[in-house]
Image (cartoon, helix red, strand yellow):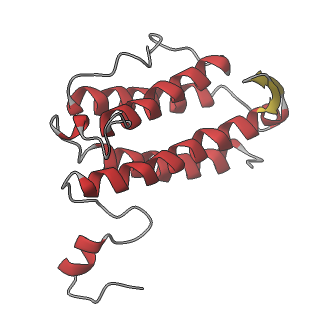
């Protein structure tokens, strides 16, 4: 939970960079990867991060350039990454209008009463949750998974260190 805008901004910077790091590895071909017949594709989950982020921001009263249709995923990985970058900029721009005191204001989200601080926590936790799904699907799709909170298997190998248990 955040008590100041600075706390959120500091956390958001690292977490949004981590999400972008993963999204930037996706290829156009990998967007269609699904681990089982009828499962969510890698592209669907990646796009869900962007679309749901914009839905939450809209409900929080952020000024959006355009509403994103969650059912209309981009055709290319570049378009997906560009949409994510725009969404991050929207968060950065709009959050600057909030004050530390405004974090305790109540909002109705998904039929429940939340504080703005809870909504911002959810914004980040939701991305962390789906990044976990992305990394599994990325590895299954044959992509090199970059480390997020530490080195990935491939990054450990490049450092010529044994993988940590």
Task: Identify the residue at image location x=23%, y=43%.
Answer: 26
Task: Identify the residue at image location x=49%, y=50%.
Answer: 15
Task: Identify the residue at image location x=67%, y=44%.
Answer: 121
Left or right: where 101 falls relative to 26: right
- Between 102 and 138, the residue placed more toward the observer is 138
Give the x, y percent position of residue 59.
66, 18
Asked where in the image residue 58 lies, by quadrant, the reply is top right
Position above or below: 158 against 98: below
Split into 4 quadrants, where in the image is the C terminus?
Answer: bottom left
Left or right: where 65 falls relative to 56: left
How many badges with numbers are in the image?
A: 0
Position above or below: 151 against 121: below
Asked where in the image residue 57 lies, by quadrant, the reply is top right
- Between 141 and 36, the residue placed more toward the observer is 36
Asked where in the image residue 88 lies, by quadrant, the reply is top left
Task: Identify the residue at image location x=40%, y=71%.
Answer: 150
> Most extreme residue toward the front, as rendered?
37
Give the x, y percent position of residue 28.
16, 34
- Between 105 and 73, the residue placed more toward the observer is 73
Give the x, y percent position of residue 9.
58, 45
């Amino acid at each position: 939970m955040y008590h100041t805008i600075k706390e959120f901004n500091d956390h958001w910077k690292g977490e949004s960079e981590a999400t972008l790091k993963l999204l930037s590895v996706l290829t156009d071909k990998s967007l269609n990867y699904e681990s089982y017949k009828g499962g969510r594709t890698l592209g669907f989950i990646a796009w869900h991060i962007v679309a749901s982020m914009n839905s939450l921001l809209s409900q929080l009263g952020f000024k959006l350039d355009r509403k994103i249709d969650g059912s209309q995923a981009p055709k290319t990985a570049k378009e997906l990454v560009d949409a994510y970058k725009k969404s991050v900029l929207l968060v950065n721009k709009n959050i600057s209008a909030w004050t530390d005191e405004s974090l305790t204001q109540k909002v109705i989200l998904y039929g429940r009463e939340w504080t703005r601080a809870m909504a911002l926590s959810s914004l980040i936790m939701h991305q962390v949750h789906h990044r976990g799904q992305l990394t599994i699907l990325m590895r299954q799709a044959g992509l090199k998974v970059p480390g997020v909170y530490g080195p990935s298997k491939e990054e450990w190998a490049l450092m010529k260190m044994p993988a940590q248990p």
